[in-house]
Each structure stands twice: as structure tokens, then as C-alpha cells.
């Protein structure tokens, strides 16, 4: 897979020189070229070579994607070349400064080949080892698989990793990072408190740090609509809502809700469908640094709260 990806080529405008070869109407020349990104020379490995083919310049896609801060991959099952160059927005709040992202998934037999990036901010020039697990969930909050991760050199610079997960993980809509050990030391599990709602029949695990910082208010609704439980921080900002639907009403409303809101179906039991919805607007005062910081920290916990949801059977 790696050798194949290194062979993928994308066109870039460069000054050409080097040895030439031809086959029929194809004229090609290997280039003894240096690589510059935004004016800075980028170091390259032996496999990263440029070639001029009929006047167009091609370089290895994976090399250039990583030089630009992203990842590249190929899914043979879909005949798809993939490039990602986004923010590293997957975190484990137990390890400050740690982030992952630019995850690419490609089918490899009965498994999934995973490529992504990691970064550990605030550690200077030091490098660290880490073992972790990547967990993959679909849009209905169901876990569809996981993959172990073993990183030997983790630091402030982005590092590209590869991993293998069992089964086909390409249907996942969200990835979670759970660190097991950092530099050989076990990272303790996050302490939680149990939220239980007997009226609507569900439980969730909230971080222990939420104690005294949140309240649950039953929001306005109409007789034919879902029950609406608003989880607010102590300043009144809505963190998320749990909506409890009649199955028929959810079926009628699902498409419109998914098109207009960040919503997850998190459970179904005893004639009820449960969804979690995020607010569509800013719920804190940007000019209040304390309020904003606390809201953002609590909002970062919501994905893990969501996957802890359990409906009473």
C-alpha cells in the first residue's frame, strides 16, 4: 500500500531538467529537483522524485500532501485517490495538547487501512511514545470498530501514522481517540458522574468536572413534538439537548432535522427514539473569557457523553 501510494502522482509547475526517456508518444524526464513549499525547502526521501511527462510536472502525491500538512491515500475498492488537509480536531481531554485528524480510510481485504496525523503541543523538542485506540462510530452513535495505535515519536510537529482496523470502517462518521499509555505510563480513566432520567428512561456518564456546573431544564414543546431536555452550563448557555420522540414522528422529521442541525440518534427503546442535538448558534459571551473558556471545555466533552448514552430496555 505504501509503495503504491508513493507512486501516485499529481501535477505541479516546476522548472524542468534531467534525464529523458520516451515510449511512443510519451516523453518523460526524471528531474533532479528540490521541493519548496511556501518558499521553504522541504526534505525528501529517496522515493520522492519529480518527473516531466509531455511538459507537465508530476510529484508523489503522498509526499506533497504531507509536506503541505495533510495526508493522502488510495481506496482501491472505490478507485478513489484521497487527500485531507484539515485541522487536527480529534482529542483526548485527559492528555492536554494532544490532537489527531486528517483520517483516511481505505478497504484492505477484510480490514480497513487507516492513515492519519497526530500532534502533541507544548512539549518543546522532546519526543514521546504513546499507545492508544481509535474507535469508529456511525451517524447513529453505534460503534462499528476500532484500531490499535502505537506511536514511537510524538511531538510538536505533525506525525503521520498508519493503523489497521477489523472490518469495513468507511461508514464511520466520527472517530474517538482513547490514550492507553503515554511514555509507558498508564493514563487514568476519566472520573465520571452518572446522570439518570427516570421519567424518560435513559442514563449518561458526565465528566466529574461537570459537578455544580450544569443544569437540566425541560424546554418548550408542542403536544405532537418530542420532549426537549436542555443541558445548560451554569451561565445559561445550552450545551446540548436530548430530544425524546415517538418513533413515527421521528421517522417523519428525521430527514429535515438531519439537514438543518447537528443531530445523532443515540438510542431506541420502549417506543421511544432518543436524539442528541447541538445548538446552532453561539451559547456564550465571546467577550467574557471565563464563560467562553468554561463553555468550550464542557463542549469538548459532549462527544464522549453522547457515546455513553444508554436507554432503559
Image (cartoon, rainbow, N blue to C red):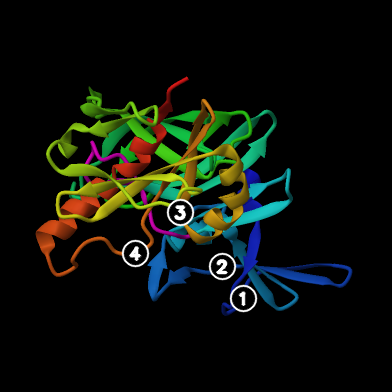
The relative height of residue 221 versus residue 307 in the rendered view (above or below) is: below
Please name the residue that numbered disc 3 is placed on.
262
Relative side of 64 to 96, left or right: right
Q: Nearer the viewer, residue 10 or 221?
A: 221
Q: Which residue is mark 4?
A: 281
- The residue shown at (35%, 32%) is 178
Q: Mark 2 or mark 1, which has the lower sequence index?
A: 1
- Residue farthest to the top? 313
Residue 242 location (% of width, % of height): 38, 42
The answer to whether residue 170 is seen in the rendering is no
Q: Measured from the top left, where is residue 86 in percent x and y? A: 44, 59
The image quarter in which residue 176 lies: top left
Question: Callout 4: 10 Å neighbours few (<14), some, many (20+)?
Answer: few
Q: CA distance from mark 3 to mark 1?
A: 52 Å
Q: Secondary structure at mark 4?
A: loop
Kindly state the secondary structure of the residue where label 3 is placed: loop
Amino acid at each position: 500500500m505504501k509503495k503504491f501510494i508513493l507512486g501516485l502522482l499529481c501535477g505541479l509547475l516546476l522548472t524542468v531538467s534531467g534525464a529523458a526517456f520516451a515510449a511512443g508518444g510519451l516523453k518523460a524526464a526524471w528531474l533532479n529537483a528540490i521541493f519548496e513549499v511556501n518558499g521553504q525547502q522541504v526534505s525528501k526521501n529517496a522515493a520522492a522524485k519529480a518527473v516531466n511527462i509531455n511538459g507537465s510536472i508530476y510529484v508523489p502525491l503522498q509526499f506533497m500532501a504531507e509536506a503541505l500538512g495533510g495526508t493522502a491515500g488510495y481506496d482501491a475498492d472505490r478507485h478513489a485517490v484521497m487527500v485531507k488537509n484539515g485541522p487536527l480536531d480529534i482529542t483526548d481531554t485527559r492528555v492536554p495538547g494532544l490532537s489527531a485528524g486528517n483520517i483516511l480510510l481505505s478497504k484492505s481485504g477484510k480490514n480497513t487501512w487507516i492513515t492519519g496525523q497526530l500532534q502533541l503541543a507544548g512539549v518543546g523538542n522532546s519526543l514521546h511514545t504513546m499507545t492508544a485506540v481509535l474507535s469508529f462510530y456511525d451517524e447513529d452513535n453505534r460503534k462499528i470498530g476500532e484500531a490499535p495505535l502505537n506511536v514511537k515519536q510524538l511531538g510538536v510537529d505533525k506525525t503521520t501514522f498508519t493503523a489497521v482496523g477489523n472490518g469495513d470502517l468507511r461508514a464511520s462518521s466520527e472517530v474517538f481517540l482513547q490514550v492507553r499509555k503515554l511514555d509507558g505510563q498508564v493514563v487514568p480513566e476519566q472520573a465520571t458522574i452518572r446522570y439518570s432520567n427516570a421519567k424518560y428512561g435513559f442514563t449518561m456518564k458526565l465528566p466529574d468536572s461537570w459537578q455544580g456546573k450544569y443544569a437540566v431544564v425541560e424546554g418548550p414543546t408542542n403536544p405532537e413534538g418530542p420532549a426537549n431536555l436542555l443541558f445548560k452550563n451554569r451561565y445559561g448557555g445550552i450545551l446540548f439537548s436530548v430530544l425524546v420522540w415517538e418513533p413515527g414522528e421521528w421517522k417523519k422529521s428525521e430527514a429535515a432535522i438531519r439537514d438543518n442541525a447537528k443531530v445523532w440518534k443515540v438510542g431506541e427503546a420502549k417506543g421511544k427514539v432518543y436524539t442528541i442535538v447541538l445548538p446552532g448558534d453561539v451559547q456564550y459571551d465571546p467577550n467574557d473569557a471565563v464563560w467562553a473558556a468554561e463553555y468550550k471545555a464542557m463542549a469538548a466533552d459532549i462527544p464522549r457523553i453522547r457515546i455513553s448514552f444508554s436507554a432503559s430496555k
